Image: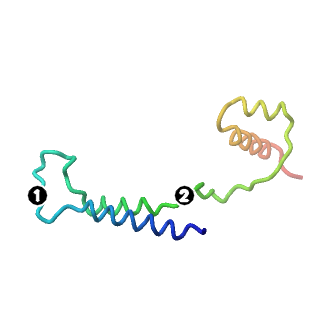
Amino acid sequence: MSGSKTNAMKRKAVLEAVRAMAPAQDFVWDGSDEDDRPATAAELAAGVEASRRKRGRPAGSGTKEQVAIRIDHDILEAFRSGGPGWQTRMNDALREWVKTHPAP
């Protein structure tokens, strides 16, 4: 199954739920309890928009390229021992090396 039918059904259910939450025409909010306040049109629209968000990994910046490279174990461990962000630190170290060693 491609999932489009399921997604369409979910959107329809969300829209029906939002419409069901819409306040009755004769309801007047007295301002005493914020929990009883009817949702504004903007809040209702935000709820519908949130249901349309795409799932999955966000798109990358487009400036990096994924490659397979073999690194000595001790070098890799030295970068990994610094915790999260080791790949960025490795990238920065390589960038520094490139700046100090111009290509022939």
Label disc, if present, on residue 104 of the rendered structure: none
Q: Secondary structure at mark 1?
A: loop
Q: Nearer the viewer, residue 5 or 74?
A: 5
Q: Nearer the viewer, residue 20 or 78?
A: 20
Is 5 located above or below residue 86 in the figure? Answer: below
Left or right placement of residue 5 versus residue 30 in this view: right
x then y, percent, for residue 99: 77, 46
- Which picture quadrant has residue 87? top right
Mark 1 or 2, nearer chain start: 1
- Which picture quadrant has residue 39? bottom left
Q: Which residue is mark 1?
A: 28
In the picture as drawn, the residue positioned furthest to the front comes out as: 1
Left or right placement of residue 26 versus residue 8 in this view: left
Colour style of the rendered protein structure? rainbow
x then y, percent, for residue 18: 31, 62
Q: Nearer the viewer, residue 76 or 17?
A: 17
Q: Secondary structure at mark 2?
A: loop
How many labels were placed on the picture? 2
Question: Looking at the image, which residue is at 29% across and 62% down?
Answer: 42
Is 9 located above or below residue 85 in the figure? Answer: below
Question: Looking at the image, which residue is at 33% across and 61% down?
Answer: 17
- Which picture quadrant has residue 32? top left
Q: Nearer the viewer, residue 60 or 43?
A: 43
Few, some or many C-alpha atoms within 10 Å of disc 2 (few <14, some 14-19, many ≥20)?
Answer: few
Question: Looking at the image, which residue is at 66% across and 32% down?
Answer: 83
**Type of residue at label 2?**
Arg
CA gap, disc 1 to disc 2? Answer: 38 Å
Q: Quadrant of the N terminus?
A: bottom right
**Type of residue at label 1?**
Val
Is 21 located above or below residue 76 in the figure? Answer: below
Q: Which residue is mark 2?
A: 55
